[in-house]
Amino acid sequence: MNGFVCGVCGYVSIDGTAPDNCPVCKAPKSAFQEKDAIKTAEAEGPKEKHVPVIKVVKTCGLMGDGCTDIHVRIGDVAHPMESAHYIVWVDFYINKKWVERVHLSPDCSPAAAAHLKSTEGKLTVIEFCNLHGHWINEVDL
């Protein structure tokens, strides 16, 4: 799958355009390059450990009404989190617009969560593995 990838932080624009500035690191448009960089569940490779598994919880246990919890586990089989091979970050998008990044380290579990105000639309999650690149999954909210 194609996207415009920021050469500074790895953010991927999935709306078909390169932004004027990266929403994550603020790099200029010139830092972006269009690439076939995102792997899906249909891709070749170790997808069982890379495709984000998304759980939408409509009732937030922390913020209450008006908040939707998103729980993401990386892989049907938990992705390894070792210094040589780990998930670096997980990005959340609503209707192809980036909303949040969660950074991980080898000391974390291969999972992330977000508390979103939006309750409708398409939720996209892209994770970045330091060895196997970007992987994507989407669900309807």
Image (cartoon, rainbow, N blue to C red):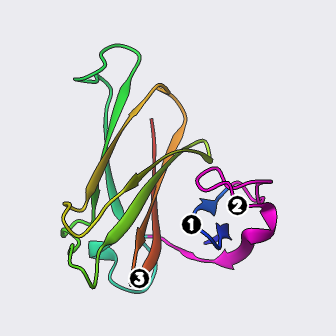
Q: Report the front residue among 48 and 61.
A: 61
Name the main secondary structure of what is drawn in magenta. Answer: loop
Q: Report the front residue among 123 and 82.
A: 82
Kind of residue at disc 2: Ala
Q: Secondary structure at mark 1?
A: loop
- Magenta highlight range: 15-40
Q: Secondary structure at mark 2?
A: loop
Check contact, mark 1 vs mark 2: CB within 8 A.
yes
Residue visible at 65% across and 68% down?
Answer: 6
Asked whether the viewer can see residue 97, the reply is yes
Residue at numbered disc 1? 9
Q: In the rendered picture of this protein, how many numbered marks are placed on residues?
A: 3
Q: Which mark is residue 27?
A: 2
Asked whether the viewer can see residue 72, the reply is no
Residue 27 screen position, x and y as percent: 70, 60
Q: How many other residues sit within 10 Å of disc 2, few (<14), some (14-19) or many (≥20)?
A: some
Could you tell whether 49 is left or right of 30 in the image? left
